Amino acid sequence: MDFNDSATEAAFRSAARSWLAEHAPAHEIGAGSKMTDIEEADRGRAWMRELFTGGWSGLTFPKALGGGGLTGSEAVIFSEEEGRYHLPKGPFTSIGTGMALPVIAKHGNDAQRAQFIEATLNGDITWCQLFSEPAAGSDLAALRTKAVRADDGSGDWIINGQKLWSSWAHLTDWGILIVRTDPSLPKHKGLTFFVVDMKSPGIETRPIRQISGASEFNETFLTDVRIPDANRIGAEGEGWSCCMTVLMGERLGSGAHRSGVEPLLDYAAATPDGRGGTMMDDRSIRQQLAEALAEEQGERFFQARLRTMVSKGENPGALAGMVKLAYAARYQKTNGLALELRGLSGIAAEAEDAQTSDVQYDYIYSTVMRIAGGADEVLRNQIAERVLGMPGEVRMDKDVPFEQLK
């Protein structure tokens, strides 16, 4: 596989780079910038509108649905160039473009695609993910939030349950929701996928205070929430398949397109070593940086292979978990190295040292990535069993109806 740009791709990269140079700086977030959740979300919507107006949003979606109608390789090229800027692209934007839209495009109907794709791409609609529960995190199929048909003949569904770790659910417009509709089937079956208006009566979000001081995660409670059947994505009982589409997009997108090591090279070169030089003069530091950069480049090329598979209609399956597993470990390691480079300042940065403050936040947040989108241990199991063909763990609940599980 040739990882170098073709002539056509090189021309596309040049055009993307020129457009970004003109439009991205006005939307960048400065080092150490402090914003409220609302301000950050508003800036995210503004950048999405800028992309949409410029014709750079939803590059792989059909033009008839508001996208660019381009190839996966062109979308990757644009994301690589976009990743050179520190733009407001948090979960409040990426859950919509990277999770909600892929599942709607693949499993939804024409009316749902028309309703949600363009409106999401231009920033009019933002999304949250209502998957994990207090007793169903790594084992998502153990979820207990249930949906039953309304008894008034409307065909609507009544939802009751609790979701956890719902990023930005307190500010987003819609949520992607997985619930149990048939407890008489084994746990991976009997699940159905919905989209839900977060303003619906019966939905309550409670922010969770994090170690970083932020509260972007939430507990979400659903009490007698009525959802029309028109908001069901895919067939009744097809929920697990929809979830796999979402999670594959989440894992393939982990760490994509933005180098975490290149800024660290600059960081090391700007950090005095106390002997008249910089930390880049330290042979051990250079070796650690070189190893991290090699790992990052290897993962980038591996991601390119998997995206080629997707563009051909193939399903990478558990291979996508390898991307996320590698990224999460490297993200934590490189942020830890960045703090070590600063010595005591890495523990207690000066008030004006915005760069170190940002690294401290990233290091704290890096622990999240070892769990979000599939915990390390779960992904290792999947890779061992489904990629390497090793014997599977004994699963006593595999064919047992969910209602019979303790």
Image (cartoon, rainbow, N blue to C red):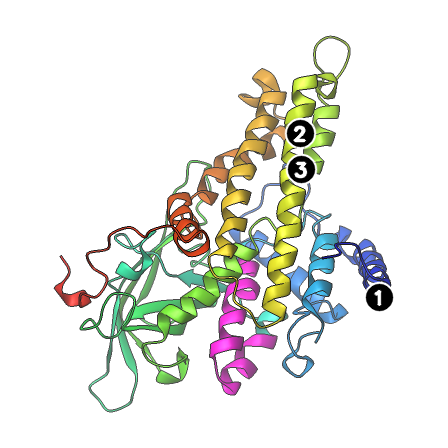
Label drawn at residue 79 = none
Report if residue 245 is visible in the image.
Answer: yes
Q: Earlier in the sequence, mark 3 or mark 2?
A: 2
Q: Are marks 1 and 2 in contact (CB under 8 Å)?
A: no
Marks 1 and 2 sit apart, C-alpha to C-alpha, by 33 Å
**Boundaries of the magenta span:** 92-118
Q: Position of residue 108 (x, y in %)?
A: 47, 80
Q: Position of residue 268 (x, y in %)?
A: 70, 25
Q: Position of residue 193 (x, y in %)?
A: 37, 73
SS type, badge 3: helix
- Name the residue tied to disc 3: 294
* Residue 391 sits inside the magenta stretch: no
Amino acid type, label 3? Ala
Q: Nearer the viewer, residue 321 or 166?
A: 321
The residue shown at (59%, 32%) is 334
Q: Earlier in the sequence, mark 1 or mark 3?
A: 1
Q: Nearer the viewer, residue 395 or 329?
A: 395
Label drawn at residue 8 = 1
| Quarter occupied by the C terminus | bottom left
Q: Is residue 392 above or below residue 347?
A: below
SS type, badge 2: helix
Amino acid type, label 1? Thr
- In this view, the mark in front (3 or 2): 3
Side (left or right) of 227 relative to 60: left
Marks 3 and 2 sit apart, C-alpha to C-alpha, by 9 Å
- Name the residue tied to disc 2: 289
Q: Position of residue 86 (x, y in %)?
A: 68, 47
